[in-house]
Image (cartoon, rainbow, N blue to C red):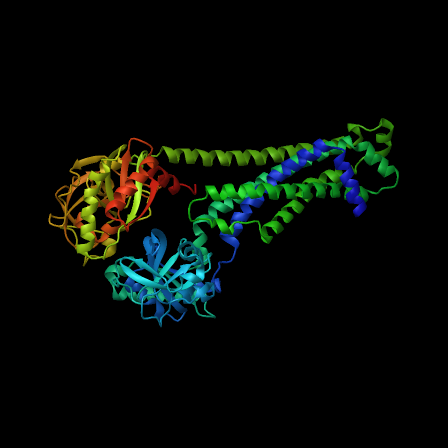
């Protein structure tokens, strides 16, 4: 075998141009496949970093990913579950003795870490059912950033919404469930909102040993039927669903990553066909050499083995070069991936990726090397030696047919891949041409979190401060107009629910299926002007639409079409129960907005003035339209906010960037 390898090396060295070209072609195919597989491996195949992850499930209320507080209280009674937990939160203002910042934070019920497994801690302990005082757990990265090292965080205090939580545990850095969380604080065992109409919570559970997702689903189906009889107005169409945590976390990326892997494997097939053709051409040129070997007694298997060793060396060199290309490809894929879909630290060239690369290199050897090697043995030795070699030394008919077949296969695969890419790119271009209903260019969005006590008085004062902020921001050079809102298009804060129309139904007594639904937005004066949303009829909100004024709303054209059959609803009253059941008068109509993504059709929207719903005022987003590049005014906007709210957490995005991220997966 060693002699075969030496012979193959000498043969390849005599044809450096051919060798370099073949290695480059295969390296591109193998490197692309290895890069994409490394992402697929990290995102879809690698086991979750939790204790016995196959026993962890999410519980949802189909088709919503959330559950109500009242329904959650029934889950622990089901025998399939050993532990059940609820959680809620997001990017919140976390304050320590070292300052305030936005951090992924979750309020989680006491059994949260029992569901996910306690083995993830590197210091301290998790909170649990025996804890009766406030407690928090943070990641090692957060602890090191704030306190120097993970162990130093134990005993330190973090503050959320004006409440202190001593840190009692530190998790491994890779433990970030859900959605890159850095801080978990213990919530009461009973949700604060225990009604059965508001979907405020997410839920996870650990199956008892011996239980399966199927048995859990069967028990949830029984609970669904029982609650439908007990609460027919709200539960006659609800359905609880148990899904493995792995499936829940990867469902949004599976189709895209599998399609991408199929595409690069097709590219690898094209590369193999290309190299096979090169080998056939080289085999024709080596006809005299092969004839001489045959005349000296080399059998067909000896010649095939010699040529396959050459192919294996080509594949090995290509695999090594492909790994180098894959490293650069991984960085590109991670950079292009939507935020939150791929854990950058998990995407590495590990043993699984190396094994996959070796496997496809071996498969490539067989694909591009076997047929040319066998074809090269079909040499008419006497004719070849008499002719002194040349292209006629190979059985020309079979060789030509094989080469033509490979060309047809290569063109067919390339054609299919190109057409698919063209269709996808065309769809992407059309996605960029969709009418959004707002003008994202030139808009800076400042996510803010201002400390408040969480009551009407404290949060109301914060809301009134936000209503005065545009006057201060208007003094910044380059700022044209500004406002504040909760629910900026393509943003992270979303709320929706059912609403009632006066004279048709009552929110408290109607069945859910009888009620229309809409997205709820809180906005301030000049919000529509700032975002470029067209006012179709009626009036905009003003700073006089506060708690002392009659409750008012503005609705979208989609809602008018679907609920009022296109007739003007101005002057009519609705109630939605966002934070109170008050009837609200419709005072305006605005154009439809693709609030969630350019790929999704506009839905019914209800806009309410945040001054009349102050409980949410501490986490408004400041929107600023500028006549200069938005990023250039971020520092002056930050200073203007911190001048009066020094404990506020602030982070900036551009509306253009938010829209782009909403279509990042396509």
Quick check: 311 left or right of 91?
Answer: right
**Can the viewer see residue 564?**
no
Residue 166: horizontal and vertical position, in percent? 34, 64
Q: Nearer the viewer, residue 346 or 507?
A: 346
Farthest bottom residue in view: 130
- The answer to which of 231 and 593 lies nearer the viewer is 593
Asked if residue 74 shows in the view, the reply is yes
Q: Nearer the viewer, residue 301 or 229?
A: 301
Q: Residue at x 74, y 32 (%)?
A: 15
Q: Position of residue 143 (x, y in %)?
A: 41, 57
Would you place residue 481 above or below residue 498 in this image?
Answer: above
Rendered view: 510 above or below 595? below
Looking at the image, which is closer to me, 480 or 665? 480
586 displayed left or right of 627: left
Q: Which residue is painted at 28% across and 32% down in the image?
A: 478
Tally the marks.
0
Side of 107 where 414 appears, left or right: right
x%, y% of residue 11? 77, 37
Residue found at x 43% / y 44%:
338
Q: Quadrant of the C terminus?
A: top left
The spot of residue 35 in percent (x, y) is 55, 44
């Amino acid at each position: 075998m060693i002699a075969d390898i030496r012979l193959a090396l000498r043969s390849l060295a005599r044809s450096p141009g051919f060798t370099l070209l073949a290695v480059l072609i295969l390296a591109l195919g193998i490197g692309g496949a290895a890069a994409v597989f490394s992402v697929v491996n990290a995102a879809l195949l690698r086991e979750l970093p939790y204790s016995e992850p196959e026993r962890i499930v999410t519980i949802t209320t189909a088709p919503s990913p959330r559950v109500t507080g009242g329904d959650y209280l029934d889950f622990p009674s089901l025998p399939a579950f050993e532990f059940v937990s609820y959680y809620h939160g997001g990017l919140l203002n976390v304050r320590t003795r070292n300052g305030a910042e936005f951090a992924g934070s979750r309020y989680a019920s006491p059994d949260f870490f029992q569901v996910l497994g306690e083995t993830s801690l590197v210091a301290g302990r998790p909170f649990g059912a025996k804890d009766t005082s406030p407690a928090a757990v943070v990641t090692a990265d957060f602890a090191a950033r704030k306190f120097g090292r993970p162990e130093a965080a134990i005993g330190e205090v973090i503050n959320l919404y004006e409440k202190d939580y001593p840190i009692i545990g530190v998790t491994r850095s890779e433990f970030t469930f859900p959605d890159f969380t850095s801080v978990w604080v213990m919530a009461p065992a009973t949700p604060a909102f225990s009604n059965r109409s508001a979907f405020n919570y997410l839920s996870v559970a650990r199956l008892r040993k011996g239980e399966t997702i199927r048995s859990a689903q069967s028990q949830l189906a029984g609970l669904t039927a029982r609650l439908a009889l007990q609460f027919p107005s709200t539960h006659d169409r609800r359905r609880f669903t148990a899904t493995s945590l792995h499936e829940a976390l990867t469902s949004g990326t599976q189709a895209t990553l599998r399609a991408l892997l199929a595409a690069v494997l097709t590219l690898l097939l094209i590369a193999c066909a290309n190299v096979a053709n090169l080998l056939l051409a080289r085999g024709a040129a080596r006809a005299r050499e092969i004839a001489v070997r045959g005349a000296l007694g080399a059998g067909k298997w000896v010649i095939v083995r010699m040529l396959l060793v050459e192919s294996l060396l080509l594949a090995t060199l290509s695999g090594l070069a492909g790994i180098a290309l894959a490293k650069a490809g991984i960085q590109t894929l991670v950079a292009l991936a939507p935020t939150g879909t791929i854990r950058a630290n998990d995407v590495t060239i590990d043993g699984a990726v190396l094994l996959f690369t070796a496997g496809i290199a071996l498969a490539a050897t067989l694909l591009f090397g076997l047929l040319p090697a066998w074809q090269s043995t079909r040499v008419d030795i006497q004719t070849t030696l008499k002719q002194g070699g040349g292209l006629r030394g190979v059985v020309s008919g079979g060789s030509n047919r094989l080469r033509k077949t490979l060309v047809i296969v290569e063109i067919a695969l390339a054609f299919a891949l190109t057409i698919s890419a063209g269709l996808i790119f065309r769809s992407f271009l059309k996605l960029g041409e969709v009418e959004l209903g707002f003008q994202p260019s030139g808009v800076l969005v400042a996510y803010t979190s201002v400390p408040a006590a969480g009551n009407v008085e404290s949060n109301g004062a914060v809301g009134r401060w936000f209503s005065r902020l545009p006057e201060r921001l208007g003094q910044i050079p380059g700022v044209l107009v500004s406002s504040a809102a909760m629910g900026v298009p393509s943003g992270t804060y979303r709320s929706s629910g059912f609403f009632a129309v006066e004279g048709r139904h009552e929110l408290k007594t109607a069945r859910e299926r009888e009620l229309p639904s809409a997205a709820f937005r809180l906005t301030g004066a000049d919000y529509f002007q700032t975002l470029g949303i067209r006012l179709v009829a009626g009036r905009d909100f003003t700073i006089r639409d506060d708690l002392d004024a009659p409750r008012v709303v503005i609705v979208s054209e989609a809602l008018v079409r679907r609920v009022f059959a296109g007739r003007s609803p101005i002057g009519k009253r609705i109630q939605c129960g966002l934070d109170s059941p008050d009837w609200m008068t419709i005072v305006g109509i605005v154009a439809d907005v693709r609030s969630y993504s350019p790929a999704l059709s506009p839905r019914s929207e209800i806009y309410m003035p945040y001054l009349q719903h102050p409980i949410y005022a501490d986490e408004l987003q400041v929107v600023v339209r500028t006549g200069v590049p938005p990023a250039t005014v971020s520092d002056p906007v930050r200073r203007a906010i911190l001048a009066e709210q020094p404990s506020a957490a602030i982070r900036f995005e551009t509306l253009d960037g938010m829209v782009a991220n909403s279509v990042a997966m396509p």
